[in-house]
């Protein structure tokens, strides 16, 4: 790229109102941050074992139960460390002997790797598919834990969550980016888990797991059967969650911001409102890409295209690195593809906090950059 092009200025009236298009951490709405600042003294610097913070945890737990329409015997567990940490907890407290993993990108593969490296578990049963597509589970009677990923954030592939036939194994769903933006049904899963820095528009560091009765039973059974580091112990996380607590000190601002998200969605009518917002945003972007003569949706199968982390593949005449560089100089940030994917891609986080008008502006900016490169 020549230096002139590197200095390309996008006209101000084309720019989106907020340029944070990252797939995680995602855009935190200004309103959430302003509310946090206004109420900060009630929560920040307060003990997480006392009423103010515990009431915040309760709002997040109850909000999730309502948002996902969970049966009354489900519990919402929280812990420090995010999803990656929870995968390690599963190797101690959720998988008895063998798990099955649908691997179709970086995140789904990382969980499978964590299990493969666990000395006390059998080698995982891995079902892989080409990047940009989604594999389907195959019932295996040795498997006691099926690992799904609802949205493979690295490739922008969305999966359907359907419990495999003829099994009483647990179904664990990595919904790290999907939770709060995609539909699912509690009768198809046992553990639906996520972090709060994606659709929930909060910050990193905490994991949340919505757990069915059989899942909670499994945690207790393995707690009694197998040694486990305290910080990874899911049964202890369950005991703490019943008291609106977390084993060790959590990031209180993260919880506050997540409560802002869940309550905003509920005030607007619930999960379908959030799902429709992301769908409208991503439909606009995919339509734009299909009409464009230099870009296409990376995921070929329409129903597998992520409504929240949209990946767009570019013709060789336009290099994604050039677009990323120009965008960054103009305040449109974090549209890089997942760092380990070697494709000429752009990726856009289109979580429900995003207004569709911003996506229209984004597409206008893409056209402007392409016509000036
Ligand atoms: C971001 C992401 C993770 C990792 O989450 P951390 O909170 O950073 O550990 C795992 N799975 C999926 C699908 C993700 O999008």
Image: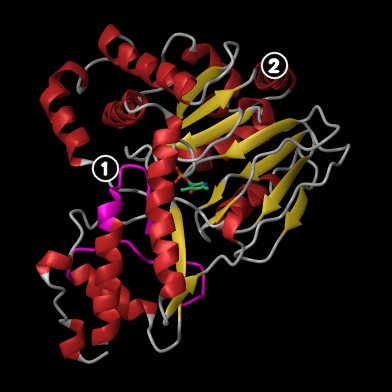
Magenta region, residue range: 330-358
Left or right relative to 105: residue 353: left
- On the image, the x and y values in percent for residue 328 come to 23, 68
The quadrant in which the C terminus is found is bottom left
Question: Label 1 crowding class (10 Å Cα cut-off): few <14, some 14-19, many 20+?
Answer: many
Residue drawn at (76%, 39%), measured in percent from left and top?
Answer: 121
- On the image, the x and y values in percent for residue 223 come to 67, 19
Whether the magenta-drawn stretch holds residue 355 is answered as: yes
- On the image, the x and y values in percent for residue 30 come to 18, 40
The quadrant in which the N terminus is found is bottom left
Residue 138 position (above or below residue 274): below
Whether the magenta-drawn stretch holds residue 171 is answered as: no
Which tag, 2 or 1, sits closer to the chain's start?
Answer: 1
Kindly identify which residue carries mark 2.
217
Residue 310, picture quadrant: bottom left
- On the image, the x and y values in percent for residue 73 come to 60, 11
Left or right relative to 135: residue 205: left
Residue drawn at (44%, 55%), measured in percent from left and top?
Answer: 309
Kindly identify which residue carries mark 1.
28
Tag nearer the camera, 2 or 1: 1
Residue drawn at (16%, 28%), measured in percent from left and top?
Answer: 35
Residue found at the far bottom of this picture: 2
Q: Which mark is residue 146?
A: none
Left or right relative to 359: residue 30: left
Residue drawn at (43%, 65%), measured in percent from left and top?
Answer: 287
């Amino acid at each position: 790229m020549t230096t002139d092009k590197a200095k390309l200025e996008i006209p101000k009236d084309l720019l989106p109102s907020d340029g944070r298009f990252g797939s995680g951490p995602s855009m935190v709405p200004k309103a959430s941050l302003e509310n946090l600042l206004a109420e900060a003294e009630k929560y920040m610097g307060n003990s997480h074992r006392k009423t103010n913070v515990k009431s915040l945890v309760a709002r997040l737990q109850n909000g999730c139960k309502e948002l996902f329409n969970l049966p009354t015997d489900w519990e919402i567990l929280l812990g420090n460390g995010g999803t990656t940490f929870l995968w390690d907890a599963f190797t101690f407290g959720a998988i008895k002997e063998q798990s099955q993993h649908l691997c179709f990108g970086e995140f789904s593969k990382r969980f499978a790797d964590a299990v493969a490296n666990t000395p006390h578990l059998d080698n995982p049963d891995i079902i892989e598919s080409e990047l940009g597509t989604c594999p389907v589970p195959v019932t295996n009677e040795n498997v006691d834990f099926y690992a799904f990923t609802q949205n493979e954030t690295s490739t922008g592939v969305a999966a359907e969550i359907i419990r495999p036939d003829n099994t009483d194994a647990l179904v664990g769903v990595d919904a790290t980016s999907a939770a709060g933006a995609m539909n699912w049904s509690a009768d198809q899963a046992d553990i639906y888990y996520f972090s709060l820095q994606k659709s929930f528009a909060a910050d990193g560091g905490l994991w949340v797991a919505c757990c069915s009765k059989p899942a909670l039973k499994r945690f207790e059974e393995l707690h009694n059967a197998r040694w486990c580091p305290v910080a990874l112990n899911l049964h202890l996380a369950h005991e703490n969650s019943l008291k609106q607590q977390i084993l060790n000190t959590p990031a209180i601002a993260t919880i506050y911001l997540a409560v802002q998200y869940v309550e905003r969605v509920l005030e607007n009518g619930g999960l379908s409102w959030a799902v429709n917002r992301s769908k409208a945003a991503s439909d606009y972007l995919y339509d734009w890409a299909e009409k464009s003569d230099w870009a296409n949706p990376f995921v070929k199968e329409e129903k597998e295209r992520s409504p929240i982390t949209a990946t767009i593949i570019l013709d060789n005449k336009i290099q994604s690195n050039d677009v990323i560089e120009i965008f960054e100089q103009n305040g449109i940030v974090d549209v890089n593809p997942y760092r380990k994917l070697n494709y000429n891609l752009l990726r856009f986080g289109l979580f429900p906090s995003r207004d569709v008008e911003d996506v229209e502006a984004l597409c206008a900016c893409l056209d402007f950059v392409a016509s000036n490169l």
